[in-house]
Image (spheres, rainbow, N blue to C red):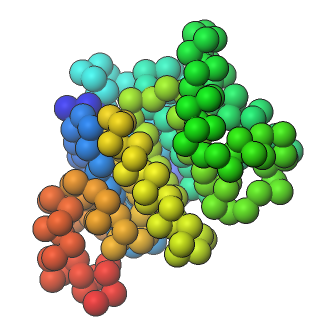
């Protein structure tokens, strides 16, 4: 198992954001986490990347404990987080934003190669490399956020609502990118409000409800499950 999360709880003050979450991410797969507003999806991702402390349970990545490590150390282990709302640096150029993703790396030649790979994947980022990030469209900013995460040379990519606020045609583009990145061997954890999209892309899915896992299974099975369809697919 690439990443394993066992019995995780996270509190924000007195609020139990997640209570008892266990998630497994096999090497090379796309795992999705779906659920309604406030179910704990974002918090689960933030726990994986060390952005919030856990109060219970353990997290291992490639067999090593990573819970308790600061986010910067978790990145160095090979986990990159594409946050909700992209969080790009608006005043910085496209290229500067991308380079922040490689901030901790010492392998300078490999960084240049990876930058070229990102520009190959996202030609629009290459065209706009000297442009300030704030002047880009929502879809371009999402691509920039993904590119920046790839610049840390991750083995696991955590994506929080990549489709949020984007037009359907751009959402489709992002979906293709996620599939391509995964086909090249990168494992993905995808948090999505758009359950239809998520269940089509993923191999395996977890459904969260009020901080607990209500259901899990192969994504195609949950996609066809009556309860899931009624609650999350609006059918
Ligand atoms: P959404 O899809 O609406 O983003 P989510 O499933 O990602 O929801 P979380 O954002 O993880 O859910 O939130 C889980 C719970 O924790 C919610 O009750 C939320 O109000 C609470 N919460 C999240 N962030 C904080 C915070 N910084 N301080 C206090 N409570 C928080």
Query: Is residue 84 in view from this perspective?
Result: yes
Q: Identify the image quadrant of the C terminus.
A: bottom left
The x and y percentages for residue 31 are 29, 50
Q: Is residue 92 visible?
A: no
Q: In the displayed structure, would residue 235 be above or below residue 188?
A: below
Residue shown at 42%/51% (left/top)?
Answer: 178
Q: Is residue 230 left or right of residue 190?
A: left
Q: Toward the viewer: 58 or 76?
A: 76
Residue placed most toward the observer, 112 or 54: 112
Across and down, in percent, residue 138 comes to 68, 63
Q: What residue do we see at 29% from left, 19% from top?
A: 64
Query: Does residue 138 sit above or below 134 in this rendering?
Result: below
18 left or right of 102 in image: left
Q: Position of residue 28 (x, y in %)?
A: 26, 38
Is the N terminus in the top left, top right, bottom left or bottom right quadrant?
Answer: top left
* Residue farthest to the bottom, as pictured: 235
In the image, what residue occupies the spot 22% across and 54% down?
203
Q: Residue at left 43%, top 69%?
A: 193
User: Left of 27 or right of it: where is 39?
Assistant: right
**In which quadrant of the rendered view does residue 106 lie?**
top right
Along the line of sight, the residue nearer the viewer: 66 or 86: 86
Coordinates of residue 19 in the picture (x, y in percent): 32, 53
């Amino acid at each position: 198992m690439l990443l394993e999360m066992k019995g995780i709880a996270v509190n924000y003050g007195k609020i139990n954001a997640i209570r008892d979450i266990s998630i497994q991410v096999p090497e090379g797969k796309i795992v999705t986490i779906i659920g309604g507003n406030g179910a704990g999806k974002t918090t689960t991702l933030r726990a994986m990347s060390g952005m919030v402390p856990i109060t219970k349970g353990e997290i291992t990545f490639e067999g090593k404990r990573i819970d308790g490590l600061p986010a910067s150390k978790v990145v160095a282990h090979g986990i990159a987080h594409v946050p909700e709302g992209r969080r790009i640096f608006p005043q910085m150029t496209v290229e500067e934003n991308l380079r922040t993703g490689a901030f901790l790396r010492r392998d300078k030649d490999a960084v240049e190669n990876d930058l070229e790979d990102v520009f190959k994947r996202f030609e629009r980022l290459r065209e706009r490399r000297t442009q300030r990030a704030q002047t880009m469209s929502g879809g371009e900013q999402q691509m920039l956020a993904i590119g920046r995460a790839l610049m840390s040379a991750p083995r696991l990519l955590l994506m929080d609502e990549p489709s949020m606020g984007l037009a359907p045609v751009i959402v489709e583009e992002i979906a293709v990118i996620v599939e391509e990145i995964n086909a090249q061997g990168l494992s993905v954890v995808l948090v999505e409000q758009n359950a239809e999209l998520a269940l089509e892309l993923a191999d395996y899915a977890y459904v969260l409800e009020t901080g607990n896992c209500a259901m899990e299974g192969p994504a195609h099975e949950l996609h066809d499950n009556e309860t899931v369809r009624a609650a999350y697919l609006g059918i």
